Amino acid sequence: MASGLFPTVGAAGATALRLSIAAIALLVLVRPRVRSWTRAEWTSVVLLGGALAGMNGAFYEAVSRIPLGAAVTLEFLGPLGLATVLSRRPRDLIWVGLALTGVAVLGVEGFEQPLTVAGVVWALVAAAFWAAYILAGARVAGTGVGMGGLAVASVVAGLLTLPVGLAAAGASLFSGPVLAMALGMAVLASVVPYSLELFALGQLPKKTFSVLLALEPAVAALTGAVLLGQGVGIGAVGAIGLVIVAAVGATLSAPTRAETVNEPTFAEVTPGVRSEATEPVATTLQGC
């Protein structure tokens, strides 16, 4: 749905609309009680909003230039790179190496649409912001502000991206057809998935849920192929498979919380457990 907005308002405009509308929806649904928040809680929430804005903005810039499956696969390097830094177990580096191999294969032989340097760079920027988002989300979760933290962080993200969107798209941001499509994008790509994610977290074992999340690159590639006509080569299939195996392996081999001491740990920053890392602040507001 976001790709339908790119020709009219660009990636920056689509990011601004999605985050702004999602923020309004979350404020209405959650009604955060911000008057009781401390300065430390406000700082954590603002940092989360900045990471959210950067992650979504960079991701949309990436998918406007390269196939969706490639962008999601490259973005997974963020949590895996963070895992490399935080891990104290040598075996965890196996999964990171496997993911990097997948990305290398993706760059050599992947999608029918060639990868541009700008698109790859934006995807890697999104990966860095995803890592920052995980750290900021864990910090917000530790403050106890709950869903209110996500709602206000979304407002911060909207405020940060709206001026950029206005500069890029101008008054076209407020045309009827654009607003209608943006409303659908915000609801279908943010509010509804987030609600379903919370429901799934309450119904499924966390590791099962984590393994399902690790399938995102494959889902993104399939979506790009079916809905956007982005052809997927054999090399891309193999590359995505390596990244998925790395994410699933990291999830299943991760130590339990009882076995960990420092936060966040490798178990909490790998892509397959990103929602657990920031609970109760989930990550469905990632641009996809």
Image (spheres, rainbow, N blue to C red):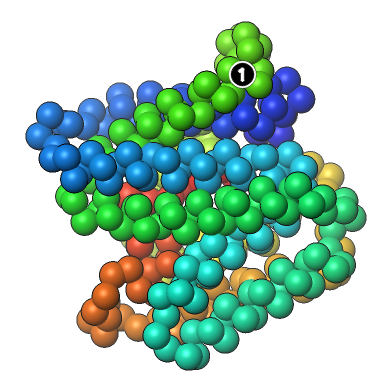
Q: Please state the horizontal and vertical placement of residue 153, each as a whole percent of the image.
A: 35, 37
Visible in this render: residue 235?
yes
Q: Please state the horizontal and vertical placement of residue 148, each as a whole percent of the image.
A: 25, 37
In the picture, the quarter occupied by the C terminus is top right
User: Which residue matches tag 1?
Assistant: 167
Instruction: Tell me what residue is drawn at x 66 percent, y 61 percent.
Output: 73
Is 145 rendered above or below residue 97? above
Q: How many marks?
A: 1
Instruction: Tell me what residue is drawn at x 37 percent, y 58 percent.
Output: 135
Q: Please state the horizontal and vertical placement of residue 241, each as a whole percent of the image.
A: 69, 73
Side (left or right) of 81 relative to 70? left
In the picture, the quarter occupied by the N terminus is top right
Q: Amino acid at mark 1?
A: Ala
Instruction: Tell me what residue is drawn at x 87 percent, y 53 percent.
Output: 114
Side (left or right) of 162 relative to 203? right
Outermost residue toward the bottom in this view: 90
Q: Residues within 10 Å of mark 1 (few under 14, many from 20)?
A: few
Q: Please state the horizontal and vertical placement of residue 260, each as a whole percent of the image.
A: 27, 81
Is 138 rendered above or below residue 89? above
Tell me the quarter of the picture where residue 99 sits.
bottom right
- Classify mark 1: helix, strand or loop: helix
Is 243 rendered above or below residue 61? below
Which is more toward the observer, 184 or 2?
A: 2
Side (left or right) of 5 relative to 266? right
Instruction: Tell me what residue is drawn at x 38 percent, y 24 percent.
Output: 24
Tell me the quarter of the picture where residue 203 sits.
bottom left
Is 16 rendered above or below residue 123? above
Visible in this render: residue 184?
no
Which is more toward the observer, 98 or 181?
A: 98
